[in-house]
Amino acid sequence: METEIQYDIDQHLEEWKINGFTIFEDLIPLATIERIREAWIHYRDGEIKKRDPDLKEKRYNFNVPFIKPFVDPDIFEHPAVVQFLENALGQDYVWAEFDSNTPFPGVDYQQWHRDTPLLFPDLMTPAYNIGVKFPLVDTFEDNGSFEVIPSTQYIADT
């Protein structure tokens, strides 16, 4: 049985407010990641064949179904995730979108962008949307699986 890591939610909230992101390391059990990844490869390949049988695009974005194994309590009901989202968005937050941005070898980097547009330019509002990302591959400097520029996601400045 794995020992559950205790996360300092207040520290994560401060990091998120300062940097626009925070990282919960070792949050999801590896067995859960592997189970999702195995199902994901089959689902991903089927979705790509529907759109692009020749893999010409090399980057695909599509919705992931809100079903098991993709929706797993190890992630969506993890006490640290729930506490963080409730503190940031309120107790009535909703998982409104579940999608994948899937790059293949040889694809160029995406242009820098915000994941969520500002509601009102130059006016800081409470957060209304948070992107929760969990990679299904090892994540390190040479491999990604995503990059973010600090202070670009949770600020009022365009």
Image (cartoon, rainbow, N blue to C red):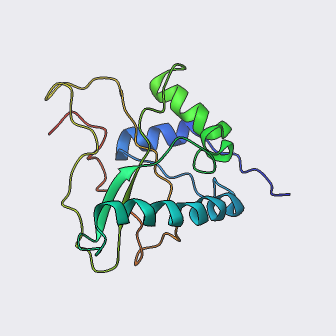
Which residue lies at the image location 16% right of the left edge and 24% below the top edge?
A: 120
Which of 42/147 is in front? 42
Which of 158/128 is in front? 128
Q: Tell me if residue 136 can be seen.
A: no
Residue 16 point in image, percent of width and height: 42, 42
Which of 99/6 is in front? 99
Which residue lies at the image location 56% right of the left edge and 51% below the top edge?
A: 24
Would you say 112 lies left or right of 79 here? left
Would you say 65 lies left or right of 61 here? right
Count of number-bearing discs: 0
Which residue lies at the image location 64% right of the left edge and 54% below the top edge?
A: 28
Residue 57 versus residue 98 in the image, above or below: below
Which residue lies at the image location 28% right of the left edge and 80% below the top edge?
A: 106
Residue 138 point in image, percent of width and height: 53, 71
Q: Tell me if residue 72 can be seen.
A: yes
Image quarter (top left, top right, bottom left or bottom right) of the C terminus: top left
Q: Looking at this rendering, what residue extends furthest in the right direction? A: 1
Residue 93 point in image, percent of width and height: 49, 24
Which of 49/141 is in front? 49
Residue 59 versus residue 127 in the image, above or below: below
Image quarter (top left, top right, bottom left or bottom right) of the N terminus: bottom right
Residue 8 point in image, percent of width and height: 61, 42
Quarter where residue 97 is shown:
top left
Quarter where residue 33 is shown:
bottom right
Quarter where residue 112 is shown:
bottom left
